[in-house]
Image (spheres, helix red, strand yellow):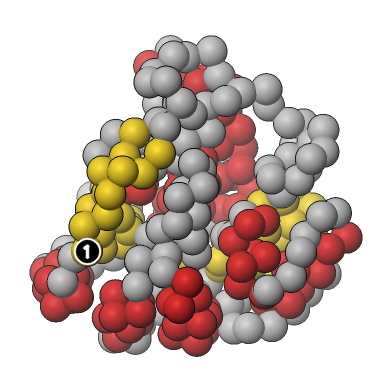
């Protein structure tokens, strides 16, 4: 019997709510063996990011190769990459992997608003990684930064998903949580097809730290378990919704707390 193997390539969140730590929790909660390639170290908590320490791109490549040469992967999630040299290194490694589902969460801003991707690296992530991605999962501020436009309605959100799909990824899901609406709907476009809406009533919670990381890593976990892409996205949204509901009444820190990754085992 073999494990379902899921790899996260992302930054470390020492407070445990987002980044590598959230990804590994999600993989575990959804029945996958999680592995990691750390692209940056952050000093952060529920109130914000206090500092970022870069990781040498050569060491990032060494982390990647150590996993690929031995264990292998069934699906990959990519999160915080921080700068162009890291992006180019990750792209180089991905080109050597054949037909592995890859979920790219183009992390640009933390929930606190702190920048996690250098502004000049935005074009690099579009040129280097979009063509290699099975699906990208930007939120509205990230979609705005990637396209250089304003998204203030469901109509402009849908157009953004269509436009991002034209830039190379096989699929795009634009997350609508940042819209001021009573719902938190996401728009999915797969390979130039008709947009699909994943609808959800908005959950009343301040504990949103790591929600985006959790969603993208959940998609990766379901892809590792051989779900088709559309089902993987829908199941991931269901998982995140339950994790948000379960974490809504929890208290941790003095800012935006985390989602409850293990709601189905912790009770």
According to the picture, the residue beneath numbered tag 1 turns out to be: 54
Q: Is residue 71 left or right of residue 262?
A: left
Crowding at mark 1 (Cα within 10 Å: few <14, some 14-19, many 20+)? some
Along the line of sight, which residue is nearer the eye, 78 or 266? 78
Residue 227: where, in percent of width, then height? 53, 56
Residue 22: where, in percent of width, then height? 36, 41
Q: Is residue 93 left or right of residue 112?
A: left
Residue 159: where, in percent of width, then height? 81, 69
Q: Is residue 244 visible?
A: yes
Q: Quadrant of the C terminus?
A: top left
User: Residue 158, located in which quarter of the rendered image?
Assistant: bottom right
Secondary structure under tag 1 reads strand
Identity of the residue drawn at 69% across and 45% down: 178
Identity of the residue drawn at 53% across and 33% down: 208
Residue 54: where, in percent of width, then height? 22, 63
Along the line of sight, which residue is nearer the eye, 129 or 69? 129
Q: Residue furthest front?
A: 50
Above or below, comparing residue 104 to residue 203 in the picture:
below
Identity of the residue drawn at 63% across and 57% down: 141
Identity of the residue drawn at 56% across and 19% down: 248
Along the line of sight, which residue is nearer the eye, 196 or 19? 19
Q: How many numbered tags mark residues here?
A: 1
């Amino acid at each position: 019997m073999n494990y379902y193997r899921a790899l996260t390539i992302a930054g470390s969140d020492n407070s445990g709510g987002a980044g590598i730590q959230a990804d590994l929790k999600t993989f575990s909660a959804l029945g996958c063996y999680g592995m990691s390639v750390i692209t940056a170290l952050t000093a952060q908590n529920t109130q914000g990011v206090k500092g970022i320490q870069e990781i040498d791109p050569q060491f990032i490549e060494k982390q990647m190769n150590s996993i690929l040469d031995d264990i292998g992967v069934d699906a990959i999630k990519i999160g915080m990459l921080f700068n162009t040299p890291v992006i180019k290194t990750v792209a180089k490694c991905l080109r050597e992997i054949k037909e592995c589902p890859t979920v790219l969460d183009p992390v640009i801003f933390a929930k606190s608003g702190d920048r996690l991707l250098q502004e000049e690296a935005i074009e690099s992530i579009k040129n280097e990684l979009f063509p290699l991605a099975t699906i990208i999962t930007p939120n509205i501020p990230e979609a705005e930064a990637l396209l250089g436009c304003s998204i203030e309605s469901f109509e402009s959100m849908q157009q953004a998903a269509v436009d991002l799909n034209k830039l190379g990824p096989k699929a795009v899901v634009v997350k609508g949580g940042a819209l001021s609406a009573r719902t938190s709907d996401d728009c999915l476009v797969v390979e130039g097809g008709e947009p699909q809406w994943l609808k959800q009533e908005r959950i009343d919670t301040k504990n949103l730290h790591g929600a985006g990381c959790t969603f993208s890593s959940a998609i990766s976990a379901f892809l590792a378990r051989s779900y088709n892409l559309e089902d993987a996205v829908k199941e991931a949204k269901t998982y995140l919704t339950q994790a948000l509901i379960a974490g809504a009444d929890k208290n941790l820190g003095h800012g935006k707390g985390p989602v409850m990754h293990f709601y189905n085992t912790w009770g």
